[in-house]
Image (cartoon, rainbow, N blue to C red):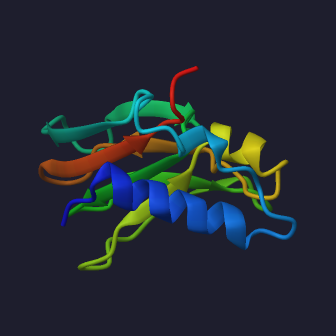
Amino acid sequence: MSFSDAVLRDIFTLLCESLDPPAPTTAVRDPKKPGKSNLGLGLAAAPAGTALMSSHADDGILTILYYDVPFLEVLEPTTQEWKAVEVIKGLHIVNIGESFRTISDGRLKAALHRVTQAEGDNNLIIYYLHQGSE
């Protein structure tokens, strides 16, 4: 399943307008300023347990991620333990980015996460939605 930029802008707008009070949607209103959004396809075949990405929070608005083996780990804020995000067939992972946290005045949080090589190959499709360029 793929998403067009228009669909992603609609999702972002819906999320912003659903907040109480609503967050501004000016970051994605101008199609002539598409920003740094991009689609990535990846395959990682490192030894199991290899750190592929150290802990971080995404910097854009949203990250939509599909993968077939659990390799994304999220820091559980209350216990400070890393927890693997299990794969549920047919569902995508959506991460809030730091820009969206800022736009929402901190009401939505950007999860601290990391990527560790699972058993076997990691195949992934990832879409980064960034705000339009100024």
Q: Nearer the viewer, residue 31 or 16?
A: 31
- Which quadrant is home to the C terminus? top right
Position in image of residue 92 (x %, y %): 35, 67
Q: Nearer the viewer, residue 36 or 53?
A: 36
Position in image of residue 24 (x %, y %): 74, 50
Query: Does residue 75 appear in the picture of this structure?
Result: yes
Position in image of residue 16 (x %, y %): 68, 61
On screen, 36 above or below 26? Answer: above
Q: Nearer the viewer, residue 104 or 80?
A: 104
Q: Nearer the viewer, residue 72 or 133?
A: 133
- Tally of numbered tags: 0
Position in image of residue 34 (x %, y %): 40, 32
**Residue lying at the far top of the rendered structure:** 134
The quadrant where residue 48 appears? top left
Which residue occupies 76% across, 61% down?
79
In the displayed structure image, the side of residue 22 where residue 126 appears, left or right? left
On screen, 101 above or below 38? Answer: below
Which residue occupies 40% across, 30% down?
32
In the displayed structure image, the side of residue 27 where residue 91 appears, left or right? left
The quadrant where residue 41 appears? top left
Query: Does residue 83 appear in the picture of this structure?
Result: no
In the displayed structure image, the side of residue 11 where residue 127 appears, left or right? left
The quadrant where residue 57 appears? top right
- Which quadrant is home to the N terminus? bottom left
